[in-house]
Image (cartoon, rainbow, N blue to C red):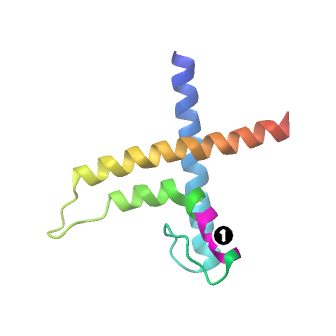
Amino acid sequence: MTKELLLAAFLIGVGLCLSGAATHLYQWLAKQQAMLRYDGKTFAGSIGNLAMSFVCGPYIMLQLGWRQEEGGTISMTSVMVSAVVAFGWAFITGLMFMGAYVAIRY
């Protein structure tokens, strides 16, 4: 059972690293803040924004959880919900990336 837990933690780590790198790369190249969206001027732009949202989603969700409310406080409920969603999403992203890597490599 320890091996499965470590594998899950490794996949979450890979997903978060991939998500953070992709978010910063997108913000550098597009010169705009990355956000969860599916709109676009054309159909191809919509598909591109949807793909960007899927890959960058875990990192964006972690950032959304740390937003301050009025009065300068941080809601623990918001932090916990965004962390659970982000780590679950990062597991899926890491699983897809590592699955593609293993399929291509071996």
Q: How many marks?
A: 1
Residue 82: where, in percent of width, then height? 36, 52
| Magenta highlight range | 44-52
Q: Give the residue at x 58% y 28%.
A: 7
SS of the residue under disc 1: helix
Q: Residue furthest left?
A: 71
Residue 34: where, in percent of width, then height? 52, 70
Residue 43: where, in percent of width, then height? 68, 76
Q: Residue furthest bottom?
A: 41
Instruction: Give left or right: position of 68 versus 52.
Output: left
Q: Look at the picture and state if 4 lies above or below 26.
A: above
- Asked if the stretch drawn in magenta spans residue 48, the answer is yes
Principal SS element in the magenta part?
Answer: helix
Q: Quadrant of the C terminus?
A: top right
Instruction: Name the amino acid type tagged 1.
Output: Gly
Q: Residue furthest front?
A: 43
Crowd rating for badge 1 (residues with CA inside 10 Å; few <14, some 14–19, many 20+): some
Q: Give the residue at x 60% y 70%.
A: 49
Residue 48: where, in percent of width, then height? 66, 70
Q: Look at the picture and state if 74 lies above or below 12.
A: below
- Asked if the stretch drawn in magenta spans residue 3, the answer is no
Q: Which residue is mark 1?
A: 48
Q: Nearer the viewer, residue 39 or 35?
A: 39
Q: Look at the picture and state if 46 lies above or below 51.
A: below
Name which quarter of the figure residue 31 lies in: bottom right
Q: Give the residue at x 57% y 72%.
A: 27
Q: Give the residue at x 76% y 41%.
A: 101
